[in-house]
Image (cartoon, helix red, strand yellow):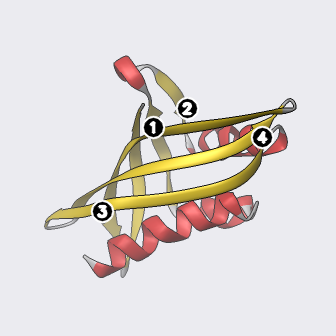
Amino acid sequence: MDQVRETLDAINQAWRERRFDALTELLDENIVMKGPDLKEYARGSQAFVQSYVQFMAQSNVIEYAESNHAVDLWGDIAVATYDWVMTYEQKGQTKTDKGHDMFVFTRRGSGWLAVFRLILF
């Protein structure tokens, strides 16, 4: 379970530090990202990474925090959930959003890759 949490932390650190190339090695090439009402936000690792690139191109993250982490494990499948709150500037306005994320991971060799992300606000 520690490796799953480390992979999740690496994903969230990479996008916040604008190290988008580092994201790719943590994702399955067919990853899917969905949001509220299960609306599809991205399909495939390139679209997934591009969603972070676009957000960070128009945003300055002032504060980001996570809490209530949980990891459940079933063999080579893991689900990680957590709450988050983020304050950021966008188009001259300061906004604060909060929500919940769920990542599904699959074990590949000695590591873990994200295959699915669900964002709930």
Label 3 SS? strand
Say whether disc 3 or disc 2 marks the residue closer to the N-terminus. 2
Q: Is residue 86 left or right of residue 72?
A: right
Residue beneath disc 2: 42
What amino acid is labelled 1 in the image? Val
How crowded is the residue under tag 3: few (<14 C-alpha within 10 Å), some, or many (20+)? few
- Judging depth in this view, the residue of 70 and 8 nearest the camera is 70
What amino acid is labelled 2 in the image? Ala
User: What is the distance, in whole Å, between disc 4 and disc 1 at their CAs?
Assistant: 27 Å
Q: Is residue 77 left or right of residue 43?
A: left
How crowded is the residue under tag 1: few (<14 C-alpha within 10 Å), some, or many (20+)? many
User: Viewer-nearest of labels 3 and 1?
Assistant: 3
What amino acid is labelled 3 in the image? His
User: Viewer-nearest of labels 2 and 4?
Assistant: 4
Residue beneath the point at 72% across and 39% down: 55
- Judging depth in this view, the residue of 111 and 69 nearest the camera is 69
Quadrant for the C terminus in the image: top left
Residue beneath disc 4: 89
- Judging depth in this view, the residue of 92 and 51 nearest the camera is 92
User: Viewer-nearest of labels 4 and 1?
Assistant: 4
Residue beneath disc 3: 69
Residue beneath disc 1: 32
